[in-house]
Image: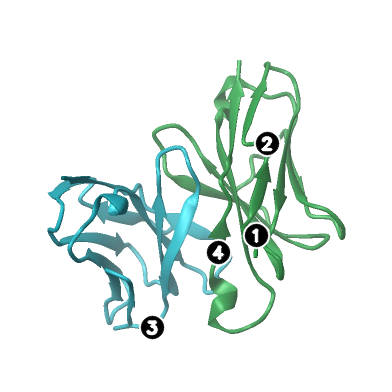
């Protein structure tokens, strides 16, 4: 079965600093999803990557999928308190986009 | 365009009772997924449904759990004879009907937090 490992598990940064969260899969990915979850709430869709080497950006968040499609990174530039939350990567290991496997999450805190 | 709707947001049941969780997908979405997030654990896939069909239920516990997505109305996740171990957050997601890359994007609802006492 597919396993996803996220690092770091938790992260505290000062406002304005850049940060990177990594997600590594034990198997080749057909699709890699990034979500943000605030404690006690639902998941907010950030981005989906499908092609090796693909990179997408939304506002100050950039996600990349490596050429081998087994690792993804999420980079936040000039972090703000609104970026705080739990970031989850999800993987489509079958190609159908139907059954996602999720990592255990990275908790991000942004200090003023 | 309203997002994925789930109700109730919080549900308390005594052991042995039934729990019914409802999910209305986004407009234009006919694919529904249910996931469960147990305390201190990650999000786990349960079941994938299209209208009137269960496509993949490989993540559903063998007993007491069932799901449906009727032609009309919301998708229902039903848990019979709940036990304390069923206490968790249950999330529903939906994805578009149309083809192309966007059909793989899953949008999540706010979740239903089930507490079994």
For the residues labelled 4 and 2, say whether their Cβ atoms are less than 8 Å apart: no
Q: How far separated are the C-alphas under marks 3 and 4? A: 18 Å
Q: B77 or A60, which is in the foreground? A: A60
**What secondary structure is found at the residue carrying circle 2?**
loop
In the rendered structure, the answer to whether residue A15 lies left or right of residue B59 reads left
Chain A, which colour? cyan
Closest to the observer, B26 or B35: B26
- Tell me the chain of label 3: A
Q: Marks 4 and 2, how far apart in space?
A: 21 Å
Vertical arrangement, residue B64 with respect to residue A56, above or below: above
Please check whether the numbered discs 2 and 1 fall on a single chain: yes
Comparing marks 1 and 4, which lies closer to the viewer?
1
Instruction: Please give the chain letter of the residue carrying mark 1.
Output: B
Label whose residue precedes the other's in the sequence (2 or 1):
1
Measure how far apart labels 2 and 1 are at the Cα level: 17 Å
Q: Tell me the crowding category of disc 4: few under 14, some 14 to 19, or many 20 or more residues within 10 angstroms, Cα based.
A: many
Apparent side of residue A16 relative to residue A61 in the rendered image (left or right): left
Vertical order, A50 against B35 (above or below): below
**Residue that badge 4 annotates:** B106
Under circle 1, the secondary element is loop
Dot 3: few (<14), some (14–19), or many (≥20) neighbours within 10 Å?
A: some
In the displayed image of the protein, which residue is found farthest to the front? A112
Mark 4, mark 2: which one is toward the viewer? 2
Whichever of callouts 4 and 2 sits on the residue coming sooner in the sequence is 2
**Label 3 SS:** loop
* Crowding near the residue tagged with mark 2, few <14, some 14–19, many ≥20 C-alpha atoms within 10 Å: some
Real-space CA distance between mark 2 and mark 3, rounded to the nearest whole angstrom: 38 Å
Residue named by callout 1: B2
Chain that the image shows in green: B
């Amino acid at each position: 079965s597919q396993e996803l490992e996220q690092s770091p598990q938790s992260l505290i940064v000062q406002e304005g600093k850049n940060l990177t969260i990594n997600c590594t899969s034990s198997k080749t990915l057909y699709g890699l999803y990034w979500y943000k979850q605030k404690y006690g709430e639902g998941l907010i869709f950030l981005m989906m990557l499908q092609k090796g080497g693909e990179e997408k950006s939304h506002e100050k968040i950039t996600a990349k999928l490596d050429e081998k499609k087994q690792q993804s990174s999420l980079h936040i530039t000039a972090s703000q308190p609104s970026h705080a939350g739990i970031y989850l990567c999800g993987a489509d290991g079958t190609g159908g986009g139907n059954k996602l496997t999720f990592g255990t999450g990275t908790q991000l805190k942004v200090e003023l | 365009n309203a997002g994925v709707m789930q109700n109730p947001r919080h549900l308390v049941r005594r052991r042995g009772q039934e729990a019914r969780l409802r999910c209305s997908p986004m407009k234009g979405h006919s694919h529904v997924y249910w996931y469960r997030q147990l305390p201190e654990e990650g999000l786990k896939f349960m079941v994938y449904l299209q209208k009137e069909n269960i496509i993949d239920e490989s993540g559903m516990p063998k007993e007491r759990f069932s799901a449906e997505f009727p032609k009309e109305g919301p998708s229902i996740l039903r848990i019979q004879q709940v036990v304390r171990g069923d206490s968790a957050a249950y999330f529903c997601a939906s994805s578009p009907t149309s083809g192309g890359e966007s059909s793989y994007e899953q949008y999540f609802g706010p979740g239903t937090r089930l507490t079994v006492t």
